[in-house]
Amino acid sequence: MGRTEPASTPPPVSKPAGRNHQVGLKALQPNTSYRLIELHTGEDRASGLLQPRDPELRVMVRGPFTLESNAVENLSVRIDNFPYKLPETVFGTARAEFPDASTVPPPPPVKPAPTKRGR
């Protein structure tokens, strides 16, 4: 009888380092399409069509990601509840690249406007 070799197991798939981040997308204009792609895995995390009245779309992402749209300037992006401004050079169908949120500090908190007190 022939000797059988043990079945070889495939190498484990390594997950990108870091923790998950919640990315929120909201449309500022009607019929804004979007596609969110993780750069480490190349996985499409979300895609579709957004309207201004739709609730904020929340997607969990690990590591850097790319945002594609038919009009990327019409999307509002929040990472872990901090708003992120798209670069001025990104508009139309251009891709917006976002680095890993754990390596990019969040924007400084907005100071509330001072209120006038009556006498």
Image: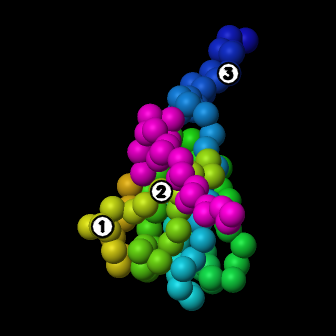
Q: Of callouts 3 and 2, which one flags the residue occurring earlier in the amino acid sequence?
A: 3
Majority SS type along the magenta span: loop
User: Which region shows up in magenta?
Assistant: 98-119
Position of 106 compared to 2: left or right?
A: left
Residue displayed at 69% across by 63% down? 119
Amino acid type, callout 2: Tyr
Q: Secondary structure at mark 1?
A: loop
Q: Nearer the viewer, mark 1 or mark 3?
A: 1
Q: Position of residue 50 (x, y in %)?
A: 61, 79
Tag 1 and tag 3, C-beta contact below 8 Å: no
Query: How far, Cα to Cα, is label 1 from label 3?
Result: 54 Å
**Foreground of the two, 87 or 7:** 87
The percent coordinates of residue 75 (x first, y second) are: 50, 72
Return the residue at label 3. Answer: 7
Callout 1, which amino acid?
Glu
Looking at the picture, how far across and down is residue 1, in whole percent? 73, 12
